[in-house]
Image: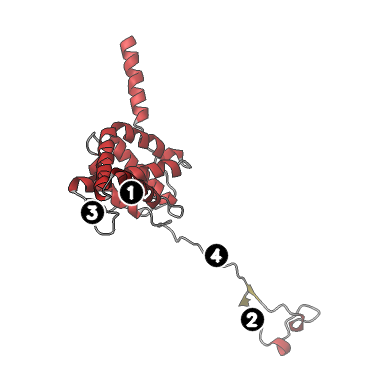
């Protein structure tokens, strides 16, 4: 009985740790943020000049980590997204791969800035730019929904597969920085509050409330 009880408790804790987020719906139909897989050196993406293949890979992984970190801070208004929980799980499960990416980036900036101290300064600037690039207000709903999906993918990914998660999802993360709204219905619903009414000035009516054709012409209704 003791063994079974321990197994049950362990299973329950494991399921809670890797809980998938509920499908938080901000719209009846959200915009499709999906995009093609990327390597990290495509035109238009933040790149590292003169980077090796390993450094390009590290840059992409670190960009994903930065995006999920920002989401963990910005998306707590909707707890069912589990952005904090799954981000922390991803950090724990893939700490070796994230550390390798960080160390690779440090070596890149040390090499390109020609020294450890200027390299550290360049690394700090890189970190600030990377985090700032994923800070959004107008696109927060779409960004948080997308980040929740990516955080779940990273949390469940086998160890050593974080780069694959980044390849498959960073297009969506960048697409989610553009504000989108409801796509099932018009974003702004215009309601016409005008009504059909006749002229109400006293000159057009006699004392008994009858319309005066001679003074105001034929009786007609207009939108007012």
Q: Mark 3 points at which residue?
A: 41
Task: Describe residue 147's horizontal placement relative to residue 61 as left or right.
Answer: right
Please, which residue is most extreme toward the bottom here? Answer: 214
Do we see residue 82 in this rendering? no
Q: Distance between the residues labelled 1 and 3?
A: 19 Å
Mark 4 against mark 1, which lies toward the viewer?
Answer: 1
Q: Which residue is drawn at 38% across and 38% down?
A: 21
Question: Is residue 37 positioned above or below 86 on the image?
Answer: below
Query: Front-most of 196 and 157?
Result: 157
Q: Name the residue under label 1.
A: 122
Please, which residue is most extreme toward the right here? Answer: 207
Q: Name the residue under label 4.
A: 191
Mark 4 against mark 3, which lies toward the viewer?
Answer: 3
Mark 1 against mark 3, which lies toward the viewer?
Answer: 1
Q: Distance between the residues labelled 4 and 3?
A: 48 Å
* Percent x, y of residue 85: 39, 34
Whether the residues at callouts 4 and 1 have beta carbons within 8 Å, the answer is: no
Query: For residue 220, which numbered disc appears in the image?
Result: 2
Q: Residue at x 27, y 47 (%)?
A: 109
Q: Is mark 3 on a helix, strand or loop?
A: loop
Mark 2 against mark 1, which lies toward the viewer?
Answer: 1
Q: How far apart are marks 2 and 3 (CA)?
A: 69 Å
First-in-chain label (4 vs 1)? 1
């Amino acid at each position: 009985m003791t063994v079974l009880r321990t197994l049950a408790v362990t299973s329950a804790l494991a399921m809670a740790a890797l809980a998938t987020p509920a499908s938080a719906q901000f719209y009846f139909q959200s915009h499709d943020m999906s995009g093609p897989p990327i390597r990290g050196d495509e035109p238009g993406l933040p790149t590292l000049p003169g980077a090796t293949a390993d450094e390009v890979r590290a840059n992409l992984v670190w960009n994903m980590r930065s995006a999920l970190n920002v989401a963990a801070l910005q998306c707590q208004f909707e707890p069912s997204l589990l952005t904090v929980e799954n981000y922390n799980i991803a950090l724990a499960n893939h700490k070796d791969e994230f550390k390798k990416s960080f160390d690779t980036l440090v070596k890149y900036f040390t090499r390109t800035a020609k020294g450890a101290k200027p390299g550290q300064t360049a690394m700090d600037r890189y970190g600030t730019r990377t985090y700032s690039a994923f800070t959004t207000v107008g696109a927060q709903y779409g960004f948080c929904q997308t980040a929740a999906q990516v955080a779940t993918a990273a949390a469940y990914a086998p160890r050593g597969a974080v780069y694959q998660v980044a390849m498959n999802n960073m297009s969506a993360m960048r697409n989610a920085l553009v504000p989108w709204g409801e796509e099932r219905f018009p974003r702004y619903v215009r309601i016409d509050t005008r009504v059909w009414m006749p002229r109400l000035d006293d000159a057009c009516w006699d004392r008994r409330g009858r319309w005066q054709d001679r003074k105001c012409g034929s009786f007609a209704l207009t939108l007012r």
